[in-house]
């Protein structure tokens, strides 16, 4: 079951409990309101009527006593006017009270009439006989009538008070019961919701901790130790599976790149990949293919030039050998033609100078080849630099998986759910912050990876520049070889001039047409230099053959 579904079920359960509490509260409020309304319309009114009647009885006693004590006519008239309204009102209130409390109040109603008659009798006594008689009559008879009314009214009043007390207790009990039920249901809802939230939180925290530990291993480059064993059919399970797939793919790429760069460092330029890379790794694969193809092409061109240099040096060596043999033959007859040798000597000196120049040029060619050899060593060093850069790439590339878009999605989902959960969602907010922190680390790791990859590309460009320098050096070797050919032509021309100068010497001059003893020495030096150049060219070819390029001839 996904986390979203579990959270929804938990929230639905909490909403149901809240709805139950709300319904119970409404029922309690309705019941309490009904009881309170009934209390206000019946018991409260009855109690109010009872208190009003008791107050009226006390008021009548005071007014009667006041009229009896003063004996003043205006006071008596004032009390009589009040009694005319008060006693009917008292009687009506007693009647209403009897109906409200369902009690017979006819005796109390009769006592009201009796109290009215007794009050009028006291007022008349005060008018006719004076205050003493009135007060005496008040004490002897009026109090007794007043007490009788109070006694007759007592039963209805007590019943009204009892009903009011009962209804009040019912309201209190109803409110307490409703409150207790709401508290119990709320407590059960709180405990159950807390258990559900704790279970969901634990289900989220445990896999996230495992993913966090795996991410820490990835952060320090330990892909093999970054194991994530969590599996589940929820959002975190999907993230864990995506991370496992990404780590497996990155591990394969790193191993394959390491294997390819080791082959390059061992001289095997015809590297191949078992499968095409995807994503940003495709650029790395293309760069390695471009590097090996370009180096293979450069090595093939250098090999072809070294073959040409070897062939040219062999031809020069053969010509020098033949020249040496001819010069030896000439030295056997040089004594017989000493008179004609003066002119020939000058030409021979010119040939000697040209031969010396040719020797220097051949040496320059040898030096050029040696420089080419050194450049090729620089190519090998550049390849080593590329290998070292690849190791740096393998150390940091493992952090690229933290760029996975699922991290941002998880952070967004956790933040949304935390906002929905309210107070109980603080734990989700912490999770969202942690996931946001992982997303920031992913951005930093990507920047670092870009820096190292740029370093690798710079190393590749350095190898290309060095290969270009080697090609330029070999081109200079070719130009030096052209100079050697020109000087040899000058030697041939000088020899032809020598031949023309000694035509008068007949057969002897013809025998020394090819050269003199000095030419023999120069030819031997040329032969030795040519042989050295041949050896250097062969050594260069051996070095080139250490590289195994695709499509190279055996």
Image (cartoon, rainbow, N blue to C red):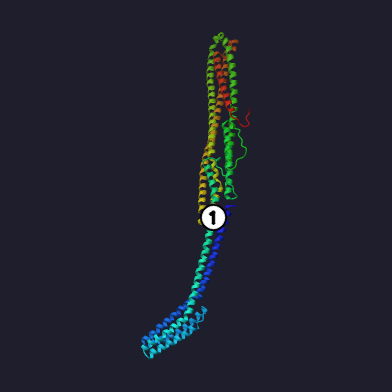
Report the front residue among 219 and 14.
14
Q: Position of residue 521 (x, y in %)?
A: 54, 15
Q: Position of residue 103 (x, y in %)?
A: 51, 80
Q: Position of residue 531 (x, y in %)?
A: 57, 20
Report the front residue among 152 and 290.
152
Is any atom of residue 244 visible in this view?
yes
Report the front residue among 383 and 15.
15
Q: Secondary structure at mark 1?
A: helix
In the image, residue 208 above or below residue 389: below
Q: Is residue 249 left or right of residue 44?
A: right
Q: Quadrant of the C terminus?
A: top right
Is any atom of residue 513 visible in this view?
no
Q: Position of residue 418 (x, y in %)?
A: 52, 54
Residue at the extreme bottom: 128
In the image, residue 267 above or below residue 417: above
Q: Which residue is mark 1?
A: 195
Quarter-of-image position of residue 21: bottom right
In the image, residue 193 above or below residue 25: above
Report the front residue among 84 and 114.
114
Residue at position x 56%, y 60% from top? 15
Say few, some or many: other residues with alpha carbon within 10 Å of mark 1 (under 14 / 14 to 19 / 20 or more).
few
The number of numbered discs placed on residues in the rendered structure image is 1
Quarter-of-image position of residue 114: bottom left
């Amino acid at each position: 079951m996904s986390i979203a579904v579990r959270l929804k079920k938990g929230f639905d359960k909490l909403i149901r409990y809240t709805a139950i509490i709300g319904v119970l509260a409404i029922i309690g409020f309705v019941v309490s309101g009904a009881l309170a309304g009934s209390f206000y319309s019946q018991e409260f009114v009855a109690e109010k009527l009872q208190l009003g009647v008791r107050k009226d009885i006390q008021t009548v006693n005071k007014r009667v006593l006041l009229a009896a004590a003063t004996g003043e006519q205006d006071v008596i008239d004032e009390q009589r006017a009040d009694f005319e309204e008060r006693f009917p009102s008292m009687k009506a209130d007693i009647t209403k009270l009897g109906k409200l409390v369902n009690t017979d109040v006819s005796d109390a109603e009769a006592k009201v009439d009796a109290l009215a008659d007794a009050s009028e009798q006291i007022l008349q006594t005060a008018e006719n006989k004076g205050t003493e008689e009135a007060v005496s009559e008040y004490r002897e008879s009026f109090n007794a009538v007043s007490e009788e009314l109070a006694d007759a009214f007592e039963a209805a009043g007590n019943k009204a008070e009892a009903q009011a007390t009962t209804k009040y207790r019912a309201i209190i009990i109803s409110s307490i019961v409703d409150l207790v039920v709401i508290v119990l249901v709320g407590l059960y809802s709180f405990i159950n919701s807390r258990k559900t939230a704790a279970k969901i939180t634990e289900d989220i925290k445990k896999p996230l901790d495992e993913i966090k530990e795996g991410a820490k291993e990835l952060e320090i480059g330990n892909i093999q130790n970054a194991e994530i064993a969590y599996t589940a059919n929820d959002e975190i399970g999907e993230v864990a599976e995506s991370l496992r797939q990404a780590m497996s793919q990155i591990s394969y790429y790193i191993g394959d790149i390491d294997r390819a760069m080791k082959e390059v460092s061992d001289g095997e330029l015809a590297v191949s990949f078992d499968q095409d890379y995807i994503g940003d790794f495709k650029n790395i694969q293309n760069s390695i293919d471009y590097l090996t193809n370009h180096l293979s092409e450069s090595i093939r061109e250098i090999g072809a030039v070294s073959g040409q240099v070897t062939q040219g040096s062999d031809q020069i060596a053969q010509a020098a050998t033949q020249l040496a043999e001819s010069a030896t033959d000439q030295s056997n007859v040089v004594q017989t033609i000493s008179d004609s040798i003066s002119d020939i000597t000058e030409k021979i000196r010119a040939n000697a100078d040209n031969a010396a120049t040719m020797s220097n040029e051949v040496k320059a060619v040898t030096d050029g080849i040696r420089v080419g050899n050194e450049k090729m060593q620089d190519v090998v060093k550049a390849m080593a630099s590329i290998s070292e850069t690849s190791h740096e790439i393998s150390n940091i590339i493992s952090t690229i998986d933290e760029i996975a878009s699922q991290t941002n999605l998880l952070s967004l989902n956790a933040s949304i759910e935390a906002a929905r959960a309210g107070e109980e969602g603080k734990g989700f907010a912490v999770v969202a912050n942690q996931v946001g922190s992982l997303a920031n680390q992913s951005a930093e790791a990507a920047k670092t990876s870009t820096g190292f990859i740029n370093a690798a590309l710079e190393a590749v460009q350095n190898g290309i520049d060095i290969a270009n320098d080697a090609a330029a050096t070999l081109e200079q070797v070719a130009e030096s070889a052209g100079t050697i050919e020109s000087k040899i032509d000058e030697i041939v021309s000088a020899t032809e001039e020598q031949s023309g100068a000694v035509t008068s010497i007949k057969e002897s001059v013809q025998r020394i047409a090819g050269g003199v003893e000095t030419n023999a020495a120069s030819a031997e030096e040329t032969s030795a230099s040519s042989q050295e150049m041949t050896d250097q060219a062969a050594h260069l070819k051996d070095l080139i053959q250490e590289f195994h390029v695709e499509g190279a001839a055996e």
